[in-house]
Image (cartoon, grey):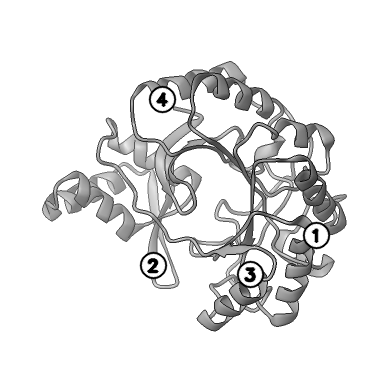
Amino acid sequence: MKHVFGPVPSKRLGQSLGIDLLPMKSCTWNCIYCQLGRTKHYVTERCEFYPPDAILSEIRQTLAGGAHIDWITFVGSGETLLYKGLGFLIGELKKITPIPIAVITNGSLLYLPEVRSELIEADAVLPSLNAGSKELYERIDRPAPGFTFRQHLDGLIQFRREYRGRLWVEVMLLRGINDSDEALYDLAAALKLVSPDMVHLVQPTRPATESDVSVPEDDRVEQAIRILSTVALVVHPVKGGMNLREVPDLLEAVAAIISRHPVQERELSLALADRFSDDFAKVESVMKELIATGRFNTVEQAGEVYWIPS
């Protein structure tokens, strides 16, 4: 399928059916930690990149398969809110399924009233806020010209005033960049203005755009939790396991997941072991067959081997 992948395990949303609405990589930012690589050309105008009926058809087909799904999650190969018509898709899904709907976004377009209105029916919205100052916002998120920290923060604040669903703000904690006490107190002050229901503290555990991006020390993570907890409940998500047990086409399922984000080799190996009842000779054979297709490469980061698209 072109737009639907999974369900795949999510750190925050259990078994999540992913809906990708964008061409790779369409984004308003060029984040230093992005797992999709650099934004070579900013996209700032909203567009109906693909026909909504085609996307709905894929979703209906997947739902009819009967797989266990905890959330339907809109998460693009770039900035999700660039898809003009997201509100229509959410409204149509509400008519056909009780499964809750989440939207993962960098939040950069929430300053637009029409964007905020399209998200009203979503059950959860997960925007990013990685900095509490203009300087760190520009260093970390590297926005397109015309996108400012004040605009981003004001969009989040206004959205909170209008939105009655669950607002879970994601903070990417980066070693030596936004994990100092000063940066964390600035971030807490900004989050207080937004008033999220939860803060999801995440780390750059997948291969990042820039080589100097790394995971913070444990004491910095603990300090971030202490400081940000004064504003909202802070969740430091635990990674779930990948479920490949019942996928009919193993190659296409693995390719669909890896095309959206790198996958740890050991996570893939565990998922295959579960599929093949701990027949590790079979697991090794299948992993070799997958690599032999030429659709995947491997890279190493922080001592972990990741599978990425060729």
Callout 2: SS? strand
Judged left or right of residue 14, residue 243 is left
Mark 2 in CB contact with mark 4 (< 8 angstroms): no
Locate residue 153: give its quadrant. bottom right
Callout 4: SS? helix
**Count of numbered labels shown in the rendering:** 4
> Which of the marked residues, 2 or 3, is nearer the chain's N terminus?
3
Q: State the residue position of label 2.
A: 304
Q: Residues within 10 Å of mark 2 (few under 14, many from 20)?
A: some
Mark 4 in CB contact with mark 1 (< 8 angstroms): no
The x, y position of residue 169, in whole percent, is 65, 55
Q: State the residue position of label 4.
A: 63
Judged left or right of residue 167, residue 28 is right
Looking at numbered disc 4 in the image, what kind of residue is underneath it? Leu
Q: Residues within 10 Å of mark 4 (few under 14, many from 20)?
A: some
State the CA–CA distance, disc 3 to disc 4.
Answer: 37 Å
* Depth order, front residue of 197/261: 197
State the CA–CA distance, disc 2 to disc 3.
Answer: 30 Å
Callout 1: SS? helix
